[in-house]
Image (cartoon, rainbow, N blue to C red):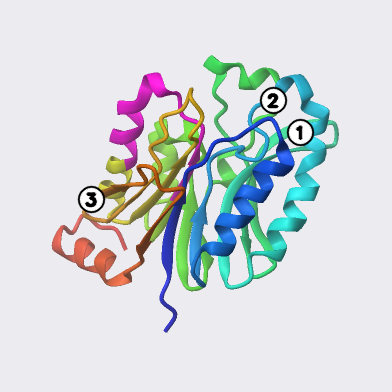
Amino acid sequence: MKKHTLCSLLFETTSDYQANLQTLLRLVNAADENSIIVAPEVCLTGFDYDNFEAVTAFGDVAGEALKKVSSQKTIILTIIEKRDDCVYNFAKVFHNGEMVYERAKARLFKFGGEDKYFVEGSDEDVRIIEVDGMKIALLICFELRFKELWQKIEGADIIAVPSWWGVLRTEHFKTLTKALAIINQCYVIASDSANEECTGLSAVITPQGEAYYNGNKPCLELKYNKKDIALMRRYMDVGIK
């Protein structure tokens, strides 16, 4: 049986897209085989609205590079792309040389003006997928605040939360990510940016609600144990299967 490792990444996004990609590739390459790796939201370009054409053009370059390093690994992040003259913030899951899942951010952060630049995705696309026998779901940053989206991913073994979360709402991020793990009795891999305006609170949270934060580590690793999920769901039976 494969032994999987959960990895939350924490690094700063600079104005140099290629340098950001190289940072991500280096961290992915350093991770163990069978790792599930979650990177911060838009970590390759940031929300660089002044250079949006360059941002959207970089998506294809990044996607091909990530496919190449995803052998025996799962990589989860968001990438900004243009489709049919519309721009979306796509969550993507790469695994074994392929992109196995993508969806557009369904709840845009209007307080930050995201709705002026992006087209919103659909709630219908928020769902659990299976990768390597594990049930994986994801919420993108602001989506973490919507309880109806939590209900759609009930039963996941792992929930990834790639984020660009404002430092002024640090306690919200800590509380919501821990609550997500506790209420779903599953692992949560939360990855926030190390940029000054963000919380920097990347973490892996267990089904018991124990949070392990990256601190100064660009990659925090924790072994995945399916039994911990089963034990918690049996011990505190709230009907999650």
Q: Is residue 41 left or right of residue 187?
A: right
Circles 2 and 3 in contact, beta carbons < 8 Å: no
Q: Would you place residue 136 above or below residue 181 in this image?
A: below
Residue at the extreme bottom of the image, as rendered = 1
Residue depicted at 32% across the width and 56% down the height: 186
Q: Amino acid at mark 1?
A: Val
Q: Element under label 2?
A: loop
Q: Nearer the viewer, residue 97 or 143?
A: 97
Disc 2 target residue: 48
Q: Residue at x 45, y 24 (%)?
A: 166
- Position of 20 relative to 172 (above/below): below
Where is residue 3? Give x, y as percent. 41, 76
Element under disc 1: helix
Q: Which residues are magenta?
A: 160-177
For the point 47% across and 59% down, the residue is 136
Residue matched to label 1: 55
Question: Element under label 3?
Answer: loop
Label annotation for residue 210: 3
Q: Which of the two discs, 2 and 1, labels the residue nearer the N terminus?
A: 2
Asked if residue 14 shows in the view, the reply is yes
Task: Describe residue 186's horizontal placement relative to residue 10 as left or right.
Answer: left
Quadrant holding the N terminus: bottom left
Q: CA distance from mark 2 to mark 3?
A: 35 Å
Number of other residues with Cα within 10 Å of mark 1, as a class: few under 14, some 14 to 19, many 20 or more: many
Check disc 2: other Cα within 10 Å, few if <14, some if 14-19, many if 20+: few
Q: Position of residue 133 (x, y in %)?
A: 47, 73
Q: CA distance from mark 2 to mark 1?
A: 7 Å
Q: Are marks 2 and 1 in contact (CB under 8 Å)?
A: yes
The answer to whether residue 92 shows anywhere in this view is: no
Q: Earlier in the sequence, mark 2 or mark 3?
A: 2
Residue 162 painted magenta: yes
